Amino acid sequence: MAGTRLAFALAGLGGFNAHGAGFLQAARDNEIEPDLVTATSGQIVVLAAYLKGAKDLKKGLIDKALEDNPFAQLQIALLGYPGVFEPAIAEAVARILTPPYLGMGIDFFTDRFLPAQLYKPTRTAETIKELADSFNKSHIGVLFNAYNPTTGEGILFGNDAARERMKTETSISILSDQKSRDPRIAKPSGREQAILAITPRAIESALWLSLYGFADIPNRQMDGAYHRSCIVSELHNFDRVIVCRPLANGWSGDTWPKSYFDVQDWNTEMWFSVGYKVEVDAMKRINSLVDRQCSSVRGLTGPDRDITCVSASRRDPIHTPDHDAEPACDSRTSNAI
């Protein structure tokens, strides 16, 4: 299997991607290159710039005309962001002029005057294709996700380098009585989720925000961060995983929400944290169980057995040893995931 020593996991959050740019810039400045990077939402764009060798990752995120503008957020909300999205004015007018013109009930008015679609994406087909090509040509593994709101299923897209490094079989067999009855989250027996090819259409889906509406979702798939804001659990065969996410583990008293907008921001951050915490806690739990089993086996070893038990680090980022054995102690080594 290709190199699986280091993986980065970049978490997107509602269009705020500066943290990913700063993290990747710091990694480059310190000559740290990962074997694979997972990304969600707008981090996909940041990652593409990094892989293309952009010298200033910040430049690709911040419009110089808006950088020192105190009303930048209001301007973006009203006029959109050049080259990324713009207000869906024509769509709003067409919606209002679509029969029936009169109706009763709250739904009739909200569908027309408070619609789901507020903006529409404006990245060109050439830009989308360039993003896909930069990933497919990269020697660094790339993995990102999308979400199908109809089926409730997540989809993974990756390049050839990612498929070479990702395990196709699970490290731990799921017992029959422990399998989920929900087909949307249950893995095929002994298999990891398939990694689909990166295409321009896949990029469009992965960057489709909820504010673009649900009528024209490409391939019926949208931004995967709404399903999983950070892709971590698939990285169990990597020695070390470094996660970059813009969310605090807690808030000090003087930073608690004070306004309506603060509350909405807090809600979003809490929702985006749930999936990450579940994935990481599960991996840490397995690491601790492997470590406990290794400790038990040490007392049973005899002169004819050569057992090496490796403990997983209890620090975040997650650390795992560099063997591909099953997660248990045997006559050769142990592996934590």
Image (cartoon, rainbow, N blue to C red):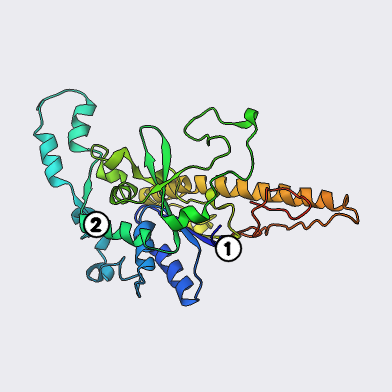
Task: Name the side, left or right, on which 119 lies relative to 32.
Answer: left
Residue under the point 28% across and 51% down: 200
Amino acid at circle 1: Arg
Residue under the point 24% across and 54% down: 77
Would you place residue 277 above or below residue 134 in this image?
above
Amino acid at circle 2: Val
Displayed quadrant of residue 242: bottom right
| Image position, residue 31 (x, y; %) | 49, 75
Front in this rendered view, residue 166 or 276? 166
Displayed quadrant of residue 6: bottom right
Residue identified by numbered label 2: 84
Residue identified by numbered label 1: 5
Say if mark 2 contacts mark 1, CB within 8 Å. Answer: no
Task: Name the side, left or right, on which 215 lies relative to 307.
Answer: left
* Mark identifier at residue 272: none
Would you place residue 48 above or below residue 204 in this image?
below
Farthest-out residue, top: 104
| Image position, residue 47 (x, y; %) | 39, 62
SS at badge 1: loop
Question: In terms of sequence position, does the residue under pointer 2 or pointer 1 come before the other?
Answer: 1
| Image position, residue 151 (x, y; %) | 39, 32
Q: CA distance from mark 2 to mark 1?
A: 35 Å
Q: Pointer 2: residues within 10 angstroms few (<14), some, or many (20+)?
A: few
Residue under the point 28% across and 45% down: 211
Residue under the point 56% across and 57% down: 1
User: Can residue 16 be spotted in the picture?
Assistant: no
User: Can residue 279 be spotted in the picture?
Assistant: yes
Q: Pointer 1: residues within 10 angstroms few (<14), some, or many (20+)?
A: some
